[in-house]
Image: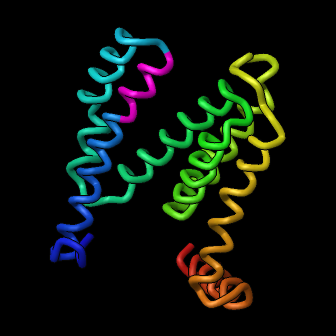
Amino acid sequence: CADLFHLRAFTAIHTVAAAAGVLLLLLSAFFAYRLGGTWPMIGMTALTATAPLEISLCQRAMIDGYFAFWAVAVLWLAWENLQRPRHMGWLIAYTLCLTILVLTKETAAFVVFAIVGTFLLNRLLRLGTVTPQLLAATVAGPALAVLLLAALVGGVSEWIQVYQMFVAKSRMHF
């Protein structure tokens, strides 16, 4: 963003956070419409637009608003895949969003665990149909992100070395 729009780094981060907040508002409205129609969409849009956390995330130059957008996108696409089993378009979009989510922040593991937990409880919750393709996409997205990170660092051995350095540094601070 900084290079593309010739912005200072801090301004670019702030711009990305604000844009992610607006996209999250639109995505929440669309998701609510898909879930229940016009009235749920209006209610969800009002709640999201006036939520103090959402407003705060849009005003701060932090990654959390961006992460929240991708987390909601993954949740919505998981729901779409439960409703329309084996639809390749939804599966590909879900896998790509899951990959981006995992690349964004390490706490994406909690989102992935929550989605897997939802799939495991699906018989009780009756949200839709969990297919082998959906489970494979849920594993493939994070795996693709980890492989991409390893490739960007320079390979698996370098990635393990960077991780070990990170662990050693964190032990020094705690």
Q: Residue at x 31, y 35 (%)?
A: 25
The vertical placement of 139 against 37, above or below, is below
- Colouring: rainbow
Q: Position of residue 147 (x, y in %)?
A: 68, 73
The vertical placement of 40 against 32, above or below, is above
Q: Nearer the viewer, residue 129 or 126?
A: 129
Q: Position of residue 38 (x, y in %)?
A: 36, 12
Q: Residue at x 35, y 49 (%)?
A: 65
The vertical placement of 76 against 63, above or below, is above
- What segment carries the magenta color? 27-35
Q: Position of residue 144 (x, y in %)?
A: 67, 65
Q: Position of residue 35 (x, y in %)?
A: 50, 18
Q: Quadrant of the C terminus?
A: bottom right
Most distant residue in the front direction: 88
Q: Quadrant of the N terminus?
A: bottom left
Most distant residue in the top direction: 39
Give the quarter of the image for residue 39: top left
Give the quarter of the image for residue 143: bottom right
Q: Residue at x 58, y 53 (%)?
A: 108
Q: Nearer the viewer, residue 87 or 19?
A: 87
Q: Nearer the viewer, residue 173 or 80?
A: 80
How many dots with numbers?
0
The vertical placement of 111 against 144, above or below, is above
Q: Is residue 152 left or right of residue 69?
A: right
Q: Main secondary structure of the magenta part?
A: helix
Q: Is residue 130 left or right of residue 30?
A: right
Residue 97 on the magenta span: no
Q: Is residue 79 left or right of residue 122?
A: left
Q: Residue at x 39, y 30 (%)?
A: 28
